[in-house]
């Protein structure tokens, strides 16, 4: 985000001047998160969740690297090595609970981050690349989380790997070969555990690299804001530091308190009790479910129960991946010139329905597959795809948005009792 009124970095101390000439890291930090980076003045607390996602990635990397020093990726002793970490390693119980619950917190803040982007139109031009890189990060996170869930080698770990990789066999001609290639054999065992452990260790660093690209892409057009109106003058912005560093610190403190409460008072709240039973290939759990953050996609996967041209199993796999790939096309599916749902009442209504629909899918994904739940999941899955492929393009063409403020400053002043004329949304 380059503005003529952005402050330039001018080191005062000789050492800092020398460092700036040889390796301009202070200048990079100043321009990225300091007073040299002007940010819209009206950002609310939903903009904290990007920083929170970065914080939980750091927590996952630090705890994950430490846990890897004591974990054994061998099907015969993997479960025992986790118990060793819990019982014998100094603060091992804390590291394991922080890592397991940190994954849930990481996905939670990312889901809120995505919801904020959907509500305020952060996927629209000129920020399409920011959104696309964000979806890539989300896919990498899902892959990392799935492979991490397998590592404790409990009942749900083993059978989750068996079921999820089994869906690849539905792909015609090459499906079974892909499944064997993923597992390194015909069933989850030592080869699969080693592969999943290696990739689970590697992918967080890949995610960190893509996050750097994500932030870099964001700094080119600058941050979106709750009005969706572009920055027009210096009055529309404030320096990132100290204004938003202080605001982010409040959000970080609040979430760390929630995180600490989860670790110390209810560390197994989000886990499945069957995963505290060592994996047994001869004993299938009564109800196989993934972690909570995969439940909506698992519900879509299970919604296809009858063959139609293609096997139902293949339809489920295509629908599950399609539900995520749809997000890549969102900047072009929504052609409305107005970004923020604050000025799009019809879009806001359907977005709320979509949120409720995702919650229904989450419930169905974790519920028993009885007829009532299957039908509910099918209806919710149909609405999910209809929202992006039918409703969103129709709303973009047919709705009449409310008038937009002329500037961010005008919107801030109006919120605090000021009065100023507004222009039409299509102007």
Image: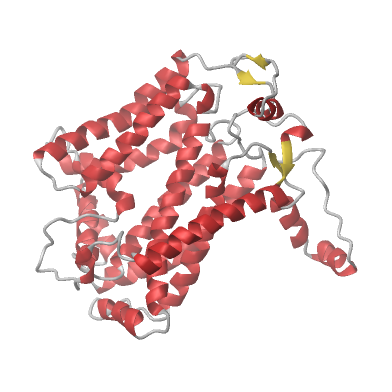
Q: Nearer the viewer, residue 136 or 412?
A: 412
Q: Nearer the viewer, residue 10 or 39?
A: 39
**Residue 74 in view:** no
Left or right, 194 with reference to 234: left
* Place of residue 402 in the rendered image (x, y in percent of width and height, measured from the top left): 54, 17
Q: Nearer the viewer, residue 145 or 243?
A: 243
Left or right, 341 with reference to 93: right
**Residue 270 in view:** yes
Residue at image coords 15%, 33%: 309
* Place of residue 248 in the rendered image (x, y in percent of width and height, measured from the top left): 60, 52
Residue at image coords 61%, 20%: 404
Asked if residue 38 is positioned above or below residue 352 in the image, the reply reads below
* Place of residue 194 in the rendered image (x, y in percent of width and height, measured from the top left): 33, 72
Q: How is the image coloured?
A: secondary structure
* Place of residue 265 in the rendered image (x, y in percent of width and height, measured from the top left): 36, 66
Q: Nearer the viewer, residue 389 or 232?
A: 232
* Picture quadrant where residue 179 is located: bottom left
Q: Which quarter of the figure is the N terminus placed in?
A: top right
Residue at image coords 11%, 63%: 284
* Picture quadrant where residue 297 is located: top left
Asked if residue 396 is positioned above or below residue 3 in the image, the reply reads above
* Picture quadrant where residue 158 is located: bottom left
Left or right, 97 with reference to 231: left
Residue at image coords 9%, 38%: 371
Left or right, 221 with reference to 395: right
Q: Which quarter of the figure is the C terminus placed in?
A: top right
């Amino acid at each position: 985000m380059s503005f003529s009124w952005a402050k330039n970095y001018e080191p005062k101390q000789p050492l800092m001047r020398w460092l700036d000439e040889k390796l301009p890291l202070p200048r990079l930090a100043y321009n990225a998160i300091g007073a040299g980076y002007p940010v819209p003045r009206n950002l609310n607390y939903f903009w904290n969740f990007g920083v929170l996602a970065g914080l939980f990635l750091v927590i996952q990397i630090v705890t994950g690297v430490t846990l890897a020093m004591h974990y054994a990726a061998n099907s015969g002793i993997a479960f025992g090595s986790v118990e060793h970490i819990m019982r014998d390693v100094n603060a091992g119980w804390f590291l394991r609970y922080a890592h397991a619950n940190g994954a849930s917190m990481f996905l939670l803040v990312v889901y809120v981050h995505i919801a904020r982007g959907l509500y305020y139109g952060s996927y629209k031009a000129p920020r399409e690349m920011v959104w696309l890189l964000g979806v890539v990060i989300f896919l990498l996170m899902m892959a990392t989380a799935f492979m991490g869930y397998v590592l404790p080698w409990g009942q749900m770990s083993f059978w989750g790997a068996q079921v999820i990789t089994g869906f690849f066999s539905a792909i015609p001609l090459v499906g079974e070969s892909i499944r064997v290639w993923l597992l390194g054999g015909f069933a989850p065992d030592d080869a699969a555990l080693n592969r999943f452990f290696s990739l689970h260790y590697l992918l967080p660093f890949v995610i960190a690299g893509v996050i750097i690209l994500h932030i870099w892409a964001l700094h080119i057009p600058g941050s979106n804001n709750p009005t969706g109106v572009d920055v027009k003058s210096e009055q529309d912005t404030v320096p990132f530091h100290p204004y938003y560093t202080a605001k982010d610190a409040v959000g970080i403190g609040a979430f760390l308190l929630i995180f600490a409460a989860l670790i110390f008072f209810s560390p197994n709240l989000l886990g499945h009790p069957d995963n505290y039973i060592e994996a047994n290939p001869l004993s299938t759990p009564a109800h196989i479910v993934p972690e909570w953050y995969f439940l909506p996609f698992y519900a879509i996967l299970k919604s296809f129960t009858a063959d139609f041209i293609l096997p139902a199993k293949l339809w489920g796999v295509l629908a599950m991946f399609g539900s995520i790939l749809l997000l890549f096309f969102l900047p072009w599916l929504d052609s409305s010139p107005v970004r923020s749902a604050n000025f799009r009442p019809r879009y806001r209504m359907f977005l709320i329905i979509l949120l409720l629909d995702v919650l229904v899918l989450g419930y169905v994904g974790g519920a028993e597959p009885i007829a009532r739940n299957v039908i509910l999941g099918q209806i919710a899955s149909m609405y999910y795809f209809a929202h992006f492929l039918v409703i969103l393009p129709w709303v973009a063409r047919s709705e009449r948005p409310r008038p937009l403020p002329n500037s961010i400053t005008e919107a801030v002043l109006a919120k605090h009792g000021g009065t100023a004329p507004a222009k039409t949304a299509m102007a």
